[in-house]
Amino acid sequence: MTLEVENLSVSFPTPTGEHVAVHDLSFSLRPGRVVALVGESGSGKSVTARSLIGLAGPTARVSAQRLSLGGQDLRRLSPRDWRALRGRDIGMVLQDALVALDPLRPVGREIAESLSAHKWGARAGRNQRVQDLLEQVGIPEPALRARQRPGELSGGLRQRALIASAIALTPPLLIADEPTTALDPSVQAQILRLLGRLREGGTGLLLISHDLGFVSRLADHVVVLHNGMVVEQGETARVLGRPVHAYTRTLLDADPVRHPPRIVTPQGTDTPPLLTAHDLSLSRRGPDGVARRILSDVGFSLHPGRTLGLIGESGSGKTTIARIVMGLTQPDTGGVTFMGERWVRGGRHGVPEGARRPRRRAMAMIYQDPLGSFDPRWTVREILADALSAGGDPSGDRDHAIATLLDRVRLPPAIAARRPAGLSGGQRQRVAIARAVAVRPALIVCDEPVSALDVSVQAQVLDLLEELQRELGMAYLFISHDLGVIRRMCDDVLVMQAGRIVEGGPAAQILTAPRHVFTRTLLDAAQDLSAA
Amino acid sequence: MTHLLHRAVPRFLGRLLGGLLVLLAAASLTFASLHLTPGDPVTAILGGASANPTPEAIAAARHEYGLDRPIMVQYALYIARIARGDLGQSFSQHMPVIAVLRAQAPPTLALMASSLAVAWLLALLSVVPTARRGVAAAIASTLETIGAGLPQFWLGILLLWGLAFEWRLLPPAGNHGLPALVLPTLSLAIPLAGFIAQVMRESFDLALDQPFILTARARGLGDGAVRLRHALRHALLPCVSLSTWAVGALVGNAVAIEIIFSRQGLGRELFLSVATHDMPLVSGIVLFIALTYILAGVAADTLYVLIDPRLKGTRP
């Protein structure tokens, strides 16, 4: 059963005229083959995927010279025919199973629904099939897992459950829309292997991703999309190895792995550390009433102007450390010293906020999702003016100060009048950086600052952070699950597993000659995913 | 299992204690209003200024209610009486308050239950088939706004005039059988349905935008099944919260509706007892309403966890 797409165009009516999301896209997908659609957000990848199963939305205008599946013309399908086709002939896997599966229902019922929607078998048979599917995608204890909700499963297990629900009726074709985005490298590697097995089993795969490393490991054919137009397509090795179009080269160059590693800042032995943390421990009671260790005996120090990276899987305690360093979470034991004075003291009697206030402006934070950290009703001018006055700006010429800040983060002054919702992801993160820099901090805590951005935007934001560090001499506490990003940004690295630091030291040593077995697993997983 | 029990028991005890405190507060308020309103509490107890009781009756009542003792002692005695389940004697009805409640509560509870059920039914019918469907959504949404804005008494009079007097389809008054329940129920249910539907529509629309809805459609699930099996459950929580509030509001609105439709019930009884200054009965009804409200809260908490199991253990 082959999917033939010829000159597919999708457009949406907007108040200012027709918006063309996809323009003249052509490719064909056969069982056992993998076609990848590559491009940044807004390039039309997801719209294409939805158009292929008739879910582009009620306002979408889909046209094509040819759109057929195994000889059946998809352009003339009735709504009933589309329903019969979805799940049976083409399955679909979305990004992030935590929200792509109904969070209120056990995953087993979600998978069974793929069967019952097509009147497959009787109830008992469906239950048996659900367990077989869970086993097929490599989930241990399938009977137990089927009764759990997505929130009760780990990221890897629930992404597998999502794939199980998409392949329940063994559709010959599967669309995977960013199947590994936002997952840990080791989980990404597992999903990569699972999708590879499906391909060997004869499933045709349409892979949508902005991760070129992932694509190069799996795809036979790559289609590069930019603003809805195909800029280049062909065999994977050719497109990624000898790109013809400038945009493809930009995408490839933006991959942090291709960037030379950081030139380590020489550490002055005579300067006292800016921040030291010692013996930080924290336990919290889970929903079942059992106390769990979130952090155990964490300690480190950070010198002025240097960057300390924090890597580890999600749930390993990275963000908890950031919160403790910011003075937002009170640890059970240990303490933090900042600028030579007590900043956090564990236990019942913490450092009062009043004692911290004079030093507050010396510490700033950049979040993964800047949109959530802005007041949506404020303009960029108001956001930055607020930060400037919090930073004790003598408020001589506020407009001038704001223009200088925007210039510093390479944004045009006209941005000042806009609101966060009207900005692109990269522009928003730049405003967040401007806000952090406005208080003239000595330390910026960066929690996954580029994880939500496209690769090329990611590269620009990382460049900006490096330049600002050189110009202003701040230290960064840099949290990321992306080893490429860590390698390019950090002087020193701490590797975290289950709330403990398993290894720490200079980035060059940790990332090339790790001593701990967990660090080696992390590196291997990243290696599996990076472009060959 | 033991640690779950270990946590469930204090939670239940906490709920129970909270409920008792609300009851105590309600009892204290009625006690205060009895003593803070102008005039002698004895005349209030014995039927207000117009009752004209004999001096012997006044002295007897004064002693019976402990009014010749210090106010703190009176308060303690009052609370102790209520704790024993003795709500006193209604002078306007010439029977114990408990007996009045026993007779009048069922019709009001029936009216509240049917109003809440019909309001939910109307809201579901208005939202589920129309949400995110262009013109249908716009029309249904407008109707919901109008419904939410209708005053219950005005709607009641309109229904009475149209359906009972002009077309004679339904009985205009009384307590007997289901037909007599229809008009009062509609008068209370239609505005409430408007409120519930507005809240439901908002969260239903949000739920329809979630990625798991796209996944469900990509499985080949029809639109109706997507709405009923996936989106609806996500839209229920705020409506359950609203319904707890509605239980309180329904009692208040029942005052007007029971009078318009000449129904027996607590609303009408509350109105009459206030009008005749029958303070024991007023206190009794207020306490009963507080109790209903507490039970509605407990029921809502149970429903929350049934709808969204993730809330298990997160609520105090």
Image: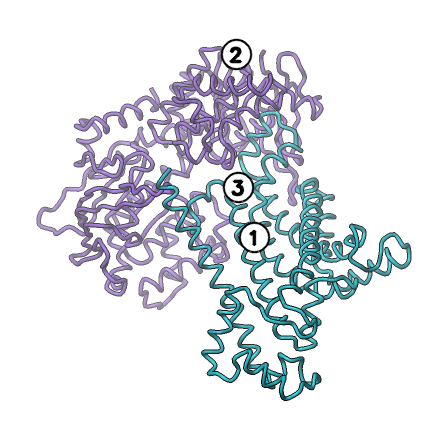
Chain colours: A purple, B cyan
Q: Residues within 10 Å of mark 1 (few under 14, many from 20)?
A: some
Left or right of A425: which side holds A512? left
- Disc 2 sits on a residue from what chain? A
Task: Kindly identify which numbered label has been placed on residue A31.
Answer: 2
The residue where tag 1 is placed is B241
Q: Are circles 3 and 2 on residues that touch, CB within 8 Å? A: no
The residue where tag 3 is placed is B306
* Residue occupying the far left of the picture: A270
Do the residues at discs 1 and 2 belong to one chain? no
Percent coordinates x, y for residue A320 in the rendering: 30, 45
Q: Residues within 10 Å of mark 3 (few under 14, many from 20)?
A: few
**Looking at this view, is A458 or A239 the one in front?**
A458
Q: Amino acid at mark 2?
A: Pro
Q: Are circles 1 and 2 on residues that touch, CB within 8 Å? A: no
Residue B74 lies, with reference to residue B132, above or below; the image says below
Mark 2: secondary structure: loop
Foreground tag (3 vs 1): 3
- Disc 1 sits on a residue from what chain? B
**Distance between the alpha carbons at the discs numbered 3 and 2:** 43 Å
Left or right of B261: which side holds A399? left
Give the position of the N terminus of chain A as an image quadrant. top right
Percent coordinates x, y for residue A442 in the rendering: 24, 54
Mark 1: secondary structure: helix
**Looking at this view, is A124 or B129 the one in front?**
A124
